[in-house]
Structures are given as structure tokens and as C-alpha cells.
Amino acid sequence: MKTPDAQRPRPGSDILKTALRRNIGAMAGGTVLMGLYQAGETAFPIALGLIVEHTMQDRSPGALALSIGVLAVIITTVSLSWRFGMRILQKANTTEAHRWRVRVADCGLEPVARDAGLKSGEVLTIATEDADQTADIIEVVPLLISSLVAVLVAAVALGLADIRLGLLVIVGTALILSVLSVMSKRIGSSTREQQARVARAGAKVADLITGLRPLHGFGGNHAAFRSYRRVSTEAKHQAITVAGVNGAYAGTAMALNAALAAAVTLTAGRLAFEGRITVGELVMAVGLAQFIMEPLKLFSDMPKYVMMARASAERMALVLTAPPVATPGPERPAAGGDLEIDCVRYGALRDLKFQVPAGEFVAIAVYQPRAAADLAAILAVRVPPHAYEGAVRISGEELAALSIEAVREHMLVNPYDGEIFAGTLRSNIDPSGTSRTVEAAVEASMLTDVVALHREGLDHGVRDRGANLSGGQRQRLSLARALAADSDILVLHDPTTAVDAVTEQIVARNIAELRRGRTTVVITSSPALLDAADRVLVLDDGVITAEDTHRNLLAGDENYCLAVAR
């Protein structure tokens, strides 16, 4: 059950605030260490100026040795503070990115789908690239503060030498940030568009990989490639645009930073020539002018990274704040109940009405494939109850009043194109590792020959999408998974279309035997499954037009005979 905090809408700004709030400790430690690093870097040219000043005055070996010792302390401080500061910040960054990846994945895997209007490939991009870029805010803020520390220390040191040098650094820094903050807004909008186009390209290639076999089958692979190439080209053009904007931003930042450094150097030279600052102060000013380039560059890059993190956070918010497609009820159905479809109108279905008593094995012969797909989608709750007319009842309780978790526990709808996952045969059949009917499911689905082929048996490795299995093996593996779940109500949609006729006969008898006493519905045109069923319902033009045993329908219904006889 979700906590109220997890259910609260999170726009992009709220996501960034959450990331900052729960990493405040790591960010504070990282800021202190990185501030110490920048202060040490700033102290180096200051120390050089003082060394030149006092060594020239005293001209003593002791003063020189002390100066070398001071420089060694500064260098050690700079090295250690950088090492441990970045370690703290990067650990917090990667941990925060992990948290958001898990949160986005959790939203995608919730029983109730969210109405985000995004394809799975887009969600994948959000769960990876956008989560990483959002978590970058954990490093951005401490680095921004530490860079500010360096600029302020340099301004104060130069101001002590001559107030005009200090003011020049402060005014120049403010001017640089004003110019770059305007440019960073363009980066944010361009980055959002690029991320959206890359996500669409990812979604397109995911769809193509899923449908690669049928595409090759009917020769549509070339058209599919052209479609992907068009989407990818759009992403490429937008990426080039973003690169151009980033290049202009970086070039402008570098030019402005160099101009400020040059202005400080020339001003210090003029003041030294006029005798208003000493030689040591001149050395310090020149060193700081060179050093200040790094924190200024880092400082000026921060608005860009902030805008990129915000753009990514807003894309994550599309998933995290999307409303559920349906609001499930709190009820739970009684165990072992019946299934009732009452005057359902949706898609190709019109006033569909039938009932399956508890424990019965019913086959539904559907003449139109679209009607079969619509019925399976409604039973699988892929279509929210408010999207269709009529009612679906489990044990007398309407589907709209039941929690999705309860429906999933009570009724399993196994699609004809069930996905196969990378892992083993066993992990595909029993993902949770809790089923007590794995062996029986393997026997019933006739998967025994696949198990016997390999020395590892059920622990034989399966590639992603079952790439190392044939079509019939993948289908039988999916069927075994459905049977191993041992749910009160099992709905199968064309479970044997990819197996031969002899195997289909055996599988049909095995399903009937294994599911004896449990409610089973098979949407199919297979004569073997129709014959094994206790009763056959004929679904034609969206309504039930006939009802009897398979053999009686064959003998008395010519249309049925033509539709299912092979």
C-alpha cells in the first residue's frame, strides 16, 4: 500500500526539493569539504604573493622554509578536501538516482496503470537518463556554493590590496551570471525537447524489437526501419541544436571569464605601475586572476546544469504525477466464485452476456478476432470499468468495486502473446518462487521435451524475449506459467496457436484435467480445446449466439462447423 507521501503529486520543482531535502547531510559535508578545497586553491596565489613580499623584505632561509611549509599544507588540504568531498557528493548522487529509478519503475509496475500518455520506451528513458540528470542537483548545489566561496575569497583578498580590484571581481561576476542565466533558459527548453525526442526514438525501437519476427514475416521490416530512421533523425537534429546552444553558452562563459581575468590583471598591473600596490600584491592579483577562471567557469556552468536537472525532473513528474486510469475499490471477491459478464458494450462487444459457474471449464469460440481481444482486455482490467457499459462480476462482486490486487490474486488472464523474460525456465514459470504446482504445470503444458533437452532442466537459461526458444516453446512456457499460478479463475486466450495438432490435443486434455474443479475460460478456435470444454459459447458479432457442447454444435450449426473445423 502506498504511503500518502508517495501518492502526493510531484511536479518537477517538488522532485528537486525532495532530492535536496533528503540529502541535506551529505550535501552539507560535501559543501564544507569542497568549500575548503576552493578556499585552499584561492589561498595558493595569495600565499605566493605574501611569500614574495616577505621573502624579498627579510631575505632569510627561515622565512623561505616557513613559506614552503605553508604551501605544503595548502596543497595537502586541497588534495584531501577534493578527494573526500567528491566521494561524499558522488555517493549521494548515485544513491539518489537509484531512488528515482526505483520510484519510476514502481509506478510502471503498479497493478493500476497510470495515464501518463507515454510509451514503455519513453518511460525507460525517464527511469535512466532523466533520473541520473535529476540527481545531479545533489552535486550542483555544493559545487555552486563552493565556487561562490572561491570568488568571494578572491574578491576580499583583492579588495584588501585595492578596493577597485575587489569591486571589479564582484561586479564582473554578477554581470557574467546575468548574461548566462538568460542563456540557460534556452538550454532548458531545448534539453526538454531533446529528451522527449530521444525517448520517442527509444519507444519506437522497443516496439520494433518486440514485433521483429512478424515484421520479417510479412516484409514490413524496411518500412519499419524508415519509420525509425525518421524519428531518430528528428532526435539527431534536436541533439545538434542542443549541442549548438551548449557550445554558445560555453563559449560565451569562457570569453566573459577570460575578459574578467584580463581586466583584473591589467588593472593590477596599472596599479602596481602607479605604486598603489606592492610587487607581492601584484603577484597575488595576477595569480588570482588566473585561478579565478576555474571557479568562475564552474560557477557559470551551474545555471545550465540546474536547468537540465529541472527539465529531467519535470519529465519524471509526467510519470509520477500521472493519475491512475481507474480508481479500484476496496472489496475482495469470495474464493472459488463464478464469473459473470452482464450486458457489456465495448469495442466489438455489444450487450455481451454470459455466466461461468465456479468450477466449470468453458470455451468461447469467437468469430471476430477483435471481439476476442476486447473481451480479454476487459477481463485483464486493461480497460478500466468506467470505459465500457455493463458489468463484470467475480463471485457476485462488480469488478469496479474490487481492488486490483484482489482481482489479480483471484483471476489470471494469460494473453496469447505472453512475454518471456531473460532468466531460466523455472523463473519464467514461477517468478515469485512460491508455486507448488510447477512440475504439474510443466507436464500439462507439454514443456517436458524442452526441459529434457537440456542438462540443467528447469534451470536452463532463457534469453530476453525467449530468443533461444521456438514460437511453440515460448507459447507452452507462457501456458505453464499461467497454470502454475493455480488461480481460482483462469482465462486463456489462444494458448495453443503455435503448437502442432497432436501436441494441442494432449495439452487440451491436460488443461481440463489439471484445472478440474477450478473455473477456466478459454477464448479459442482450437477444436481440441473446444472439445475438452464442458460447454462452448459462440461469440459472433459481439453477442453470444449459441451455447452447447463442441460436438453438438458441430452436428447442428453449419456456421460453427465452418469456423472451427480444420
Image: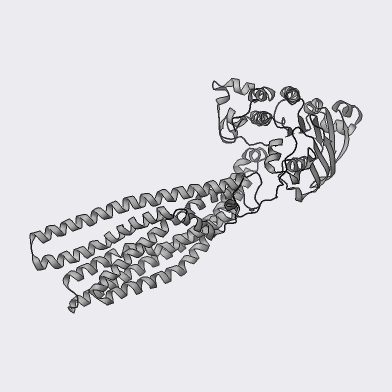
Do we see residue 291 in this rendering? yes
- 425 or 200, nearer to the observer: 425
In the picture as drawn, the residue positioned furthest to the left comes out as 60
Q: Residue at x 15, y 68 (%)?
A: 53
Residue at the location (17% across, 56% down)? 69
Q: Quadrant of residue 254?
A: bottom left
Q: Does the rendering let one see residue 411?
A: no
Taking the image as shown, residue 21 lies to the left or right of residue 118, namely left
Whole-percent x, y for residue 220 in the image:
65, 43
Residue 552 image position (x, y, % from top left): 89, 27
Quadrant location of the C terminus in the rendered image:
top right
Q: Quadrant of residue 256?
A: bottom left
User: x, y percentage for residue 495?
Assistant: 72, 31
| Residue 221, placed above or below residue 428 | below
On screen, residue 295 above or below 529:
below
Asked if residue 451 is positioned above or below residue 378 in the image, the reply reads: above
Corner quadrant of residue 222: top right
